Image (cartoon, rainbow, N blue to C red):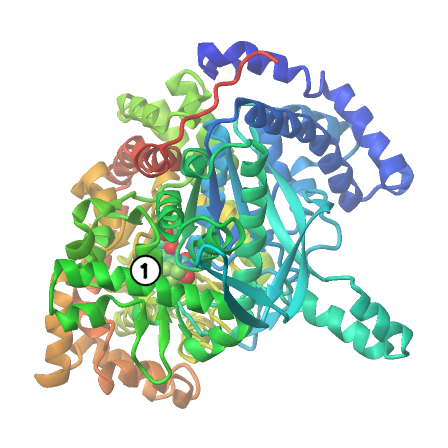
């Protein structure tokens, strides 16, 4: 590792090492100390769980030192900070990441072995931190890793849910949701009982005019809930920088009110108040790409945003600077519209509490915020009903009306008499009831708006935000293509591949500058290199095959082509097309003679992903996948030629095992619907090829790795609208191969046909909104090309190596540097000698 540290940072890094463990004995001593004192257990009954706890505590001690120093350094430097506001942080496990980023996993491995433990088993004890649904939450986690690794002064702000995303069990082929209580023992968080903020809800607004004729608004009454800070250290890779993720937990505000109730004998109600307050941060909403407009969700959003802004403003005020310098000290990024209330809250603080003029305050607000959009799906665009909002946040509603008024006045000046334009861009939708359009508020309140892949950023400019491009000009809208951290998604998930790459690139520096991967392309014809490349993939497949055997009882052959689709279950992501394709393959195999069958490429189709609990169609898709597996996996005619697996409870730590074991993975959303996708990047980085549509980041992946290395199919985004129009007003016939698939389902081949009629009639009778039938033929044909390509193992390995070599662009480090330069205007804080 040492050689990989850039010269200017090496000295500081070496010094940092002295804060690590001297050697394995030093590590062991610390583990034993924690077992015997912190955990109050004896070494004689130290099981794997205790070993995990003690090992985590030992590493945590190392982190805390650098965490404190980093915070001191940042405060002392007094430079601009960025705050990343996200309702989701899908962190996964922390111990492995901490050991690798500190650079002492080897020491821990040897030390644990001395104590009688395998490090893999110890790592497995950790419960995933699963405070997110899917791509959006995992992106936030990758960003934190990059911000720390690149030495940016940055904080994350989120909610400390007591229950993360539910655990998925598959019972009789159906999804069952089990609560994810993850806080039993969590060594990675530090409660800050001294860092609390009182958050107000409900109540009313009074207005008075002061001596200068200025209107003063006061928000009074209602109820108060306390926000308590919990801090999580975020270690950078091969740098002492350790940033902070602050998660807020809700608690009843202890006040006379409760005390009176309690004293007057109303014990039950004093407890009920407390429970109501704690409900705010109790549970993560389990929807992905869907807005349900629930009051508790709005409460979560305001609670988190108000606490975070109070914290940020408090920190700024310590610097004693003038308010106009706020945007020079603070950048706030809105991860989708979920934190958009922050725009209104900062305006409220500046105008109502600090007494700034509206104009001056609004300039500060809009210079501070940036907004990232992650979807064009209409059902995911957040709207709040005005009556509900008014009840909960009366002053904020007034401010939104004022913000809207001034905004619409400026639009009127630019487009006089264009009433339709005013109605279209208004923050308020004139429906019954009226609705607040959060994306419009986020655009009006920010200085930059970005999409997350080129196609998506173009789409928002030409469709949902078209009018705003006319109002604000095109420069306000920009693209920052998503990225992933190579530390977790290569070094941690695929240690053998990472080591092979470092043996050829000369060091681990590719983990800090992923474009160095290009160097391995020189070895693509080197026989030894290719052999090891193939062996690593095979070993990863063997590991996944074991997991499949243990969890489903099904034997799969690691030499078969592993075809993987793991992501949230959603009609737009089209797992239904995948399983229909699997059925088509099964029917084809059944129609062949045993001799002909032998020419077929054996495949294992692997699915994984959670359905939102209320998403009926997604649950039906899961059920069909399991029903097909039950038939196909037990069909003696088929044997190893086809297996269908649904992996239960897909999450970050399972992704780390599954992704390195894939030969081909599926990224097959209807063109124009997947904003970016990020697992596509993870699969290719691990030497898997992909089959995909011309959607999201697939397009840029193709440009980087070359068309010969990806299997693209299906209709293009530009044609989707016309095709949908035809479904409704023209003739719509189901693709003949797909019709045969439907026929087999309806015959009862996979059990009760009625269980699956929703999926069939969506295509046949309800306009096939996601173009499953339109793309089916192209999909099947392209899968045949995949088979053919895989049979040429030499050609396949070349594609695999070339692809990995050309993935440098997709590091979240590149992505964060683009945000820092183009949106936040911040610089890394150099690490000087302590
Ligand atoms: F609807 N994404 C997600 F835009 O995972 F808010 N959950 C969500 O609720 C939304 C978006 C939201 C995903 C996108 O679907 C995916 O394409 C993208 O790669 C990811 O966000 C990160 O940008």
Mark 1 falls on what kind of element? loop
> Residue 315 or 743: which is nearer the viewer?
315
Residue lying furthest left in this view?
730
**Percent of width and height locating residue 741:** 27, 78
User: Assess mark 1: CB under 8 A from ligand 1?
Assistant: yes
Q: Residue at x 67, y 65 (%)?
A: 224
Where is residue 220, by image quadrant?
bottom right
**Percent of width and height locating residue 489:** 46, 40
Could one spot residue 642 in this view of the protein? no
**Percent of width and height locating residue 469:** 18, 54
Classify residue 624 as left or right of residue 16.
Answer: left
The residue indicated by pointer 1 is 375
The C terminus - image quarter = top right
Where is residue 754, by image quadrant?
bottom left
Residue lying furthest front in this view?
211
> Residue 244 or 756: which is nearer the viewer?
244
The vertical placement of 661 against 755, above or below, is above
The vertical placement of 794 against 269, above or below, is above
Number of residue marks: 1
Could one spot residue 353 in this view of the protein? yes
Q: Residue at x 71, y 55 (%)?
A: 183
Where is residue 325, by image quadrant?
top left
**Percent of width and height locating residue 49:** 76, 46
């Amino acid at each position: 590792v040492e050689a990989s540290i850039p010269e200017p940072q090496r000295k500081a890094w070496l010094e940092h090492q002295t804060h690590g463990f001297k050697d394995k004995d030093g590590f062991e001593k610390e583990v034993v100390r924690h077992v015997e004192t912190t955990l109050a257990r004896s070494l004689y009954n130290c099981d794997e769980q205790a070993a995990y706890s003690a090992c985590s505590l030992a590493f945590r001690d190392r982190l805390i030192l650098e965490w404190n120093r980093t915070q001191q350094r940042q405060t002392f430097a007094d430079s601009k900070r960025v705050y990343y506001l996200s309702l989701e942080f899908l962190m996964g496990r922390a111990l492995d990441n901490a050991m690798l980023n500190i650079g002492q996993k080897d020491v821990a491995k040897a030390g644990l072995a001395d104590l009688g433990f395998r490090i893999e088993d110890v790592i497995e004890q950790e419960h995933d931190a699963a405070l997110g649904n899917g791509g959006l939450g995992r992106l936030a986690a990758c960003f934190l890793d990059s911000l720390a690794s690149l030495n940016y002064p940055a904080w994350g702000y989120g909610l400390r849910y007591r229950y993360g995303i539910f655990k998925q069990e598959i019972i009789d082929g159906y999804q069952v949701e089990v609560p994810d209580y993850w806080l039993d023992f969590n060594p990675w968080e530090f409660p800050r009982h001294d860092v609390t903020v009182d958050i107000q809800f409900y109540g009313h607004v009074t207005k008075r005019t002061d001596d200068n004729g200025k209107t003063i608004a006061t928000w009074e009454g209602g109820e108060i809930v306390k926000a308590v800070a919990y801090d999580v250290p975020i270690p950078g890779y091969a740098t002492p920088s350790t940033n902070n993720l602050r998660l807020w937990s809700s608690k009843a505000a202890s006040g006379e009110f409760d005390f009176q109730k309690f004293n007057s004998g109303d014990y039950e109600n004093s407890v009920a108040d407390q429970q109501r307050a704690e409900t705010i941060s109790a549970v993560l909403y389990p929807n992905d790409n869907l807005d349900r407009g629930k009051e508790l969700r709005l409460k979560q959003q305001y609670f988190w945003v108000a606490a975070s802004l109070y914290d940020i403003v408090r920190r700024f005020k310590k610097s004693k600077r003038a308010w106009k310098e706020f945007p020079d000290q603070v950048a706030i990024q809105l991860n989708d519209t979920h934190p958009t209330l922050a725009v209104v809250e900062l305006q409220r603080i500046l105008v109502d509490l600090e007494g700034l003029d509206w104009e001056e305050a609004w300039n500060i607000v809009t210079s501070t915020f940036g907004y990232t959009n992650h979807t064009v799906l209409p059902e995911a665009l957040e709207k709040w009903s005005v009556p509900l909002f008014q009840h909960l946040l009366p002053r904020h509603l007034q401010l939104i009306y004022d913000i809207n008024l001034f905004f619409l006045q400026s639009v009127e000046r630019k487009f006089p008499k264009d009433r339709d334009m005013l109605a279209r861009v208004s923050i308020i939708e004139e429906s019954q009831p009226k609705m607040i359009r959060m994306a419009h508020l986020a655009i009006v309140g920010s200085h930059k708006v970005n999409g997350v892949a080129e196609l998506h950023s173009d789409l928002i400019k030409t469709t949902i935000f078209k009018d705003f491009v006319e109002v604000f000009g095109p420069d306000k809208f920009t693209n920052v293509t998503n990225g992933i951290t190579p530390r977790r998604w290569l070094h941690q998930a695929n240690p053998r591949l990472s080591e092979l790459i470092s043996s050829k690139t000369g060091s681990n520096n590719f983990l800090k500058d992923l474009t160095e991967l290009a160097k391995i392309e020189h070895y693509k014809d080197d026989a030894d290199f290719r052999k090891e490349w193939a062996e690593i993939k095979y070993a990863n497949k063997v590991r996944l095959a074991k997991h499949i055997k243990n969890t489903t009882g099904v034997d799969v052959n690691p030499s078969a082509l592993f075809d993987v689709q793991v992501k949230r279950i959603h009609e737009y992501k089209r797992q239904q097309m995948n399983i229909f394709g699997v059925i088509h393959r099964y029917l084809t195999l059944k129609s062949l003679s045993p001799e002909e069958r032998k020419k077929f490429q054996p495949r294992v189709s692997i699915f994984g992903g959670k359905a939102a609990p209320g998403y009926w169609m997604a649950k039906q898709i899961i059920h069909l996948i399991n029903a097909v597996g039950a038939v196909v996996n037990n069909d003696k005619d088929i044997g190893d030629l086809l297996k269908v697996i649904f992996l239960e409870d897909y999450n970050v730590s399972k992704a780390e095992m599954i992704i390195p074991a894939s030969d081909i993975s599926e990224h097959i959303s209807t063109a124009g619907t997947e904003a970016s996708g990020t697992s596509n990047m993870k699969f290719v980085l691990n030497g898997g090829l992909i089959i995909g549509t011309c959607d999201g980041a697939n397009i840029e992946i193709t440009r980087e790795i070359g068309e010969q290395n990806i299997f693209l199919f299906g209709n293009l985004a530009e044609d989707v609208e016309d095709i949908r129009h035809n479904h409704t007003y023209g003739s719509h016939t189901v693709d003949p191969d797909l019709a045969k698939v439907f026929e087999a389902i309806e015959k009862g081949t996979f059990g009760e046909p009625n269980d699956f009629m929703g999926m069939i009639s969506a295509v046949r009778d309800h306009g096939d909104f996601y173009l499953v039938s339109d793309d089916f033929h192209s999909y099947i044909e392209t899968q045949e090309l995949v088979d053919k390509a895989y049979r040429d193992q030499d050609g396949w390995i070349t594609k695999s190596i070339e692809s990995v070599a050309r993935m440098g662009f997709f590091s979240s480090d590149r992505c964060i540097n683009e945000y820092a330069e183009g949106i936040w205007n911040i610089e890394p804080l150099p690490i000087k000698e302590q």
